[in-house]
Amino acid sequence: MQRTLALKRRRLIVGGVALVSMANFRFVAAQTAGRAAFHFNGADYFFRWSNDTLFEFTPPGQTNLDTWTDMVSVVVFRGVKTADDLAGAANSLLDSTKSKGAVLKTRSVPRTPDRPAEHFIASMMAGPGVVEGVFTRFVLMDGMGYTLIFSHRFYGEDLHKAAQLLGDWENAHGADTEKALMSFAPVPGVGVLEKWRAVGPSKD
């Protein structure tokens, strides 16, 4: 990367937010009432909510955004235009995560002739009755910054136990989740996101 990525994230903080087969994470061109927006790691994901910057998707049956277990989110950074801007956004999220949660891993993918540098942050966040593992990928597409985020939650009043469960889950699935997130292309851009938003949340 052009700037040092020090590491940051969503929902419990939304950012101030082995190759995987395309069958594991592919777009459905236009979501309709009963159709998924995309597939990720064998599960369908449906559009649930947006505030024009944050777009959230969950699997069937996880329509309650207070009690979901798995979520894919896309955050649009309209003010991020360059590789340096993207690194700055990643560093900002990293600083926030360090103050509010635990940073588990960071890495940057150097730029190539075909695409700009990317950045990755894995973190653990905690709130009242919930512990959340967060995998965040920063990308620059068509002169605009995005984060593609996968989150997995455990609930319970005993946060120590919930954190242990999340740790076990991350040990078993963290590497594969990172590979799936980082190998997916293309990340949905504003045009696709706005189409899903126009259709409205799925009730599945």
Image (spheres, grey):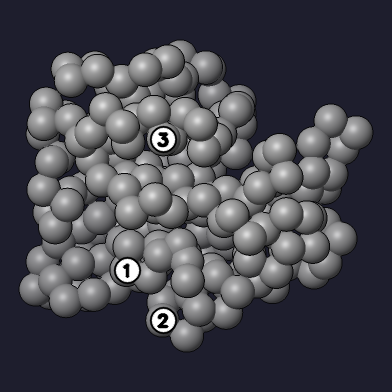
Q: Disc 3 residue type? A: Glu
Residue 182 pos. (x, y %): 60, 39
Front of the two marks 2 and 3: 3
Give the answer, above or below, for where 160 lies relative to 203: below
Q: Name the quarter where the C terminus is drawn.
A: top left
Q: State the separation of the CA atoms marked 3 and 1.
A: 24 Å
Q: Which residue is mark 3?
A: 194
Q: Residue furthest bottom?
A: 99
Could you tell me if the residues under marks 1 and 2 are in contact, i.e. CB atoms within 8 Å? yes
Q: Residue furthest front?
A: 198
Give the answer, above or below, for where 193 lies relative to 147: above
Q: Residue at x 79, y 43 (%)?
A: 116
Mark number displayed over residue 12: 1
Q: Which residue is mark 2?
A: 100
Q: Name the quarter where the N terminus is drawn.
A: bottom right
Q: Residues within 10 Å of mark 3 (few under 14, many from 20)?
A: some
Lower position in the chain sequence, tag 2 or tag 3: 2
Residue 106 pos. (x, y %): 63, 61
Front-most of 81 and 21?
A: 81
Residue 13 pos. (x, y %): 38, 70
| Residue 68 appears in the figure | yes
Q: State the separation of the CA atoms marked 1 and 2.
A: 9 Å
